[in-house]
Image: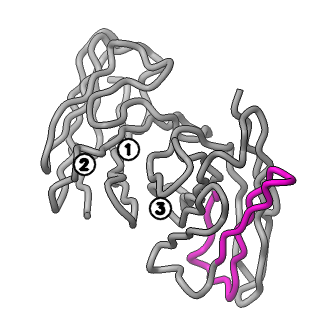
């Protein structure tokens, strides 16, 4: 199941709102889709799972939505530490697949 | 808290073999399935494979099947990735990661810091 993320890069200012898209080539069963954040030089970190559930420690300014083939990660009120690369991942079945990532840059 | 520490990376010549390891602590290792995920320099994430909590079930990405093997030792809380016939395109940071449950469990909830493997002559 190929995941395509858009845009490739998003340039926004702190305090702004980010909307990241993840589109699957086939339906993601049971909405088993996750979002990860990767800051430079760090390992990825789980933010959202089951499309809309926040992982432990994820601030409530992060929210996930969607089902079927279209999913969205929204970050409201961007903080400086939110500027990073975000990956979506489907885990409904093997092979697990990741999107190519969206880079969120400071404008 | 969950700690995953990878080791074994370095520079290896094409065609050689290498074993990467991951030492786990801070949780009951034998209760959780484990993953390997890799990331080529400047690129995205690529799933490598999964091993169930007891080692009886394994999944590998198609592109690496036949060249890799994942194993675990629950008595030592360690996870291994054996890679054979290494190619330059295997150059990547290799992450050990914990699944959120024990069986065929594909959600990853914790990641190590990774170990860099460079395949070059």
**Residue matched to label 2:** A5
Q: Chain of mark 3?
A: B
Give a yes or no on whether discs 1 and 3 share a subunit: no
Question: From the viewer's perspective, is the residue at label 2 or at label 3 nearer?
Answer: 3
Q: Residue at x 15, y 56 (%)?
A: A27
In the drawing, does residue A19 fall left or right of residue B68?
A: left
Q: Residue B87: x, y in percent?
A: 62, 83
Query: Where is A88 relative to B56, above or below?
Result: above
Q: Are the residues at dot 2 and dot 1 in contact (C-beta closer than 8 Å)? A: yes
Up the image or down, A103 lies above or below A97; here it is above
Question: Within 10 Å of the Cα at label 1, are there few (<14), some (14-19), or many (20+) other Cα atoms?
Answer: many
Residue A34 image offset from top left, x and y in percent: 35, 40
Q: Secondary structure at mark 3?
A: strand
Do marks 2 and 3 share a subunit? Answer: no
Query: In the figure, is residue B52 to the left or right of B82?
Result: left
Q: Give the quarter of the image for residue A70.
A: top left
| Residue occupying the point 80% across, 65% down | B10
The chain letter under disc 2 is A
Quarter of the image for the N terminus of chain A: give it: bottom left
Local crowd at mark 3 within 10 Å, few (<14), some, or many (≥20)?
Answer: many
Contact, mark 1 vs mark 3 (Cβ under 8 Å): no
Q: Which mark is residue B46?
A: 3
Q: Chain of mark 1?
A: A
Residue sitting at x 22%, y 52%:
A29
Secondary structure type for disc 1: strand
Would you say A27 lies left or right of A50 here? left
- The span from disc 2 to disc 3 (Cα, nearest Å) is 15 Å
């Amino acid at each position: 199941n190929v995941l395509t993320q858009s845009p490739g890069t998003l340039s926004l200012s702190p305090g702004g709102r980010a909307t990241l898209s993840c589109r699957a080539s086939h339906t993601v069963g049971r909405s088993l889709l996750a979002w990860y954040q990767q800051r430079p030089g760090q390992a990825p970190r789980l933010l959202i799972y089951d499309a809309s559930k926040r992982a432990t420690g994820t601030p409530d300014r992060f929210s996930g939505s969607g089902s079927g083939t279209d999913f969205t990660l929204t970050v409201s009120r961007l903080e400086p530490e939110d500027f990073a690369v975000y990956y979506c991942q489907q885990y409904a079945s093997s092979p697990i697949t990741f999107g190519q990532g969206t880079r969120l840059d400071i404008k | 808290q969950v700690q995953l520490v990878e080791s074994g990376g370095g520079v290896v010549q094409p065609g050689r073999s290498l074993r990467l390891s991951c030492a786990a602590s801070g949780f009951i290792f034998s209760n959780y399935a484990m993953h390997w995920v890799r990331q080529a320099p400047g690129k995205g994430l690529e799933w490598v494979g999964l091993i169930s909590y007891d080692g009886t079930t394994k999944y590998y990405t198609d592109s690496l099947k036949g060249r890799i093997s994942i194993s675990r030792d629950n008595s030592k809380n360690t996870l291994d990735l054996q890679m054979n016939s290494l190619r330059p395109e295997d150059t990547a940071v290799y992450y050990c990661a914990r699944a959120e449950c024990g069986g065929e469990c594909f959600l990853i909830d914790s990641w190590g810091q990774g170990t860099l493997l460079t395949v070059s002559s």
